[in-house]
Amino acid sequence: MLSTFLSHQKKSFWRSRNRGGSIAAQVVLGLFMLYFLVIAAALGFGMTVLLPKVFPKVDVMTSFNGIILYYFAFDFLMRLQLQELPTLSIIPYLHLKVSKSKIVDFLNIKALFSAFNLWPFLLFLPFCFITIAKQHGILVVLAYILSIFSLMLLNNYLILFIKRKSISNILFTLGGLVVVSGFAALEYFKIISITAASDIVFRAITKQPLLALIFPALTYLVYKINSVFLRKNLYVEELSAKQEKKVSTDYPFFNRFGKVGVLAALELKLIIRHKRPRNTVLMGTIILAYGFLFYKPQVLQTNSFGMMLFAAVFMTGMSIISYGQFMFAWQSAHFDGLLSKKIDFKDFIKAKFLLFTIASTLLTIAASFYCFIDAKLLLLHLVAYLYNIGFTTVMVLFLATYNYKRIDVSRSASFNWQGMGATQWISIFPFILLPILIYWAFNLFHLPYVGLAAIGLFGLVMLLMRGFWVNFIAKRLEQQRYKIAEGFRE
Amino acid sequence: MILEVKNLKKVYGDKTVVNIENIQIEQGETVGLVGNNGAGKTTFFRMLLDLIRPTEGEIISKNENVSQGDNWKSYTASFLDEGFLIDYLTPEEYFTFIGSLNNLSIADVSAYLTQYGEFFNNEILNSGKYIRDFSKGNQVKVGIAAALMQKPEILILDEPFANLDPTTQIRLKNLLKAQTGSMTTFISSHDLNHVTDVCNRIILVEKGKVIKDFKTDENTLKELESYFSA
């Protein structure tokens, strides 16, 4: 029975409608995974060398023991945010002649297919075999492996249980992060120490390997609780997140823009009320930290704006690109409805421009705190801002008229590559390359500020031409409407 | 004549899905489109709303080709499927949005909605849910009420009776009957009882072609039943 379930899963992947896209996405995702796995393996094998360097005055065993519980604390938080509940796939089986315990088994086994369940092996096992085996013998190594393996499964099923109890949300994760960093701080000020606790636990295991059996026992307990809970609550509506009362909202700010404002408010609600677009936009704010990587004193002194321009354009325009590259697919579920309503294509496009401009303006204001590093950066950001609202917006919206890939916006956010296609990859290049090319052309003659001015002017001219671009893109959209609508219907 | 279909054809690959020579619809008519699955009803409606490009032919709404202008949108309201709803809005927000496209203020919209308390069975307004959280029947109610709110001259509904409970089916029939005269209505349905009851003209389609086109009278239901049981 289990193998039938798994083969159905395999089929659902290979036969999904946008198979091409999802295979490409899996390949990219696979490469990412491979990258992280290689890093984990490298860290794992290098731990013998690295640990004494990071914690110079401490015995290697003590520091290794110390990080194990820490790792699983972070693992817990990461899983809380990223690990998905395998629920929806069981709906077609619930009414059939399949025993509930089989279905529960299937859910439990399916939950094991997660990258989180690979990392601990690569990270910790090499050290166990290299160092611990030498110092304490094979029995202790087995005890360590058993403990680590059990802790991993413990996290795996504990997360599923917590998520099913649906007390998980982003605040919860942030809270957990605060708690863990709180412990780290306490550790730093030598008040309480997880490291010490972790060390004590594993030192005890080194002395008496049989103590390691506590972990599998704990894990089994959690696994059992999880299974029993699942068995009792195998109703789809109870397995998904709880409903809270929804309220109607109104954004008075947008009222002044008339119908354009109405459409912009509509899209803002779309962003706020769906996880994937919300995360996509939030990405844009996280990228604000890029400046710390690129704005280095010596680069600032010599006025070499080239690489800094890269960061500035990214910081002030990332949300335009990351959200805009999937346009208008965010609205694919109701695109037919929009087309049949009395909506002017120009208003439709203007609303997007309005949102992009607001987003970029807010990001630019937020990024101005970099002026504490150097006031020149304000100028750089202004240039990048003009470039983004002038050029990037136009480019993104123009490319959007070539995007026929549906997005089911209600599906979850992490590692969801639905709607990815060639258009999405193409859009990134001119966005980054163009300003740098303009700048380099002037920089050849040692005119960095003129180069910046040229980019700013380019953005400004594009901005002044916005009326023209609105008409141009609206016309494109009108021509493409059948094709886009057809693609969005699948 | 408010709506005319001329030599309309839609071909997918080598399959002709819609092939209609001519249909003329007068103002105030309530037309029922009847046919089995695959008869091309939804494709036809989509072309009527300019959502699909016809392979050949044209649809003329008040002397204007629907694929060339936008004027028809100001007097045409429609509800084909859930794709016409914006499902992450609350019903109130959706009505306000549709109202604002038709220059209705929030007060106008809520005044309009008060008369729908019965139709909504008090399950829709102030429910604290997004449209996506409603049952299919209630979603259909939202879509139909939003379409009627636009006070359209042409109303297009695809299978409005499906998914509705019996009480609401009867209420909807009364609503549609009350509007006849002023509004031209185009509905499709698999329920022969309902269409013959509501419509004064029936168009029977099969494999994209118009088989019969006639005014309803007391014999219509029998005629249709004998056609479909054959």
Image: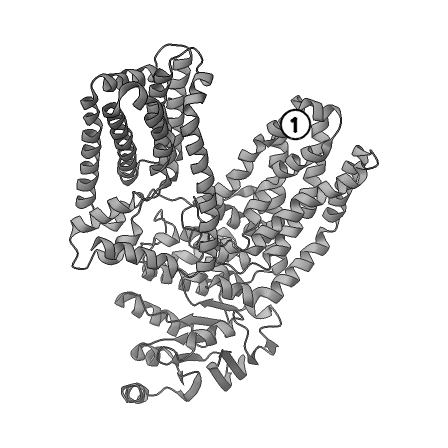
Q: Nearer the viewer, residue A404 or A259?
A: A404
Q: Nearer the viewer, residue A340 or A460?
A: A460
In the picture shown, does residue A139 fall above or below B127?
above
> Residue B173 appears at what percent x and percent y?
34, 72
> Residue B155 appears at what percent x and percent y?
46, 71
Residue indicated by mark 1: A295
In the picture shown, does residue A227 fall above or below B158?
above
- Figure coloring: one colour
Q: Nearer the viewer, residue A403 or A394?
A: A403
Q: Amino acid at mark 1?
A: Tyr
> Residue A138 appears at what percent x and percent y?
25, 25
Q: Is residue B65 visible?
A: yes
Name the residue at 62% across, 72% down. Answer: B68
On the picture, is A210 further left or further right than B91? left
On the picture, is B17 further left or further right than A130? right
Name the residue at 56% across, 35% down. Answer: A287
Q: What kind of element bears circle 1? A: loop
